[in-house]
Amino acid sequence: LKLKKKKRKPSGIWRYVLNETAKYLAKYDKLRFFSGVTYDQDGDGVRDSDDVIKKSDPSHLFFVPMWCENSTLIDHTSCKDIIFIPYILPLKGKNLNCLEPSEYLYDNTARMRDIELLTGIEFFTDRNIWSDVEAIQLRTLLRIR
């Protein structure tokens, strides 16, 4: 994994993401935040091969704020009534969009299954909390306004 370090303050969409995350944290108190990079150079929605990954920079950044709807944790980290909003944002090239940050973020909302396919990470695997059916529903949920 190679990421280029840039010593700049976040701007544009990244400043908006940080501000929105701070709002979620203030509102819900306990917030989990997963993030990482993905490699999808051909844009097919599936993780690139290890050979391609070794020779390329990440193509996207994913992040998922998660919180419990009623703030009741089952095991200090998980809750049955989990709320989450997954995003996948492109990293390559200039961002030439003319949308407001909130619209741009909404346009890059994803399903947890999309993140699973791009990373190999599996979510909602604890069958003591979520049944198979519930896990599939959570993984394939696409949030709408």
Image (spheres, grey):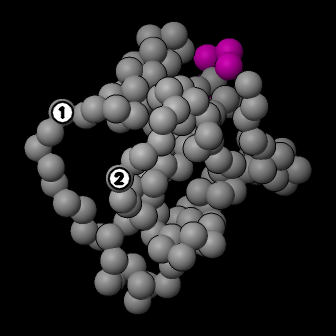
Residue at the location (52% across, 32% down)?
A: 99
The vertical placement of 132 against 55, above or below, is above
Ranked by sequence position, the earlier of labels 1 and 2 is 1
Using the image, tell me which numbered label, if any, was put on residue 20.
none
Q: Which amino acid does label 1 sit on?
A: Lys
Residue shown at 42%/46% (left/top)? 96
Identify residue for label 2: 94
Helix, strand or loop: magenta stretch: loop
| Residue 21 visible | no
Q: Return the residue found at the far left.
A: 7
**Could you say where residue 126 lies in the image, as x and y percent from the top left?**
69, 50
Q: Nearer the viewer, residue 106 or 84?
A: 106
Residue sticking out furthest to the top: 27
At 62% across and 67% down in the image, what residue appears?
A: 45
Q: Give the vertical position of 145 relative to 118 (above or below).
A: above
Q: Quadrant of residue 87?
A: top right
The answer to whether one can see residue 98 in this image is yes
**Could you say which is closer to the camera, residue 78 or residue 26?**
26
Q: Few, some or many C-alpha atoms within 10 Å of disc 1 (few <14, some 14-19, many ≥20)?
A: few
Quarter of the image with the C terminus in it: top right
- Residue at 61% of width from left, 17% of height from top? 71
Specify the segment rendered in magenta: 69-73
- The crowd level at tag 2 (other Cα within 10 Å; few <14, some 14-19, many 20+) is few
Kindly report which numbered mark, 1 or 2, lies closer to the viewer in this rendering.
Answer: 2
The x, y position of residue 113, in whole percent, is 69, 56
Q: Give me the disc on residue 9.
A: 1
What secondary structure is found at the residue carrying circle 2? loop
**131 or 106, nearer to the observer:** 106
Question: Which amino acid type is marked by label 2?
Answer: Lys
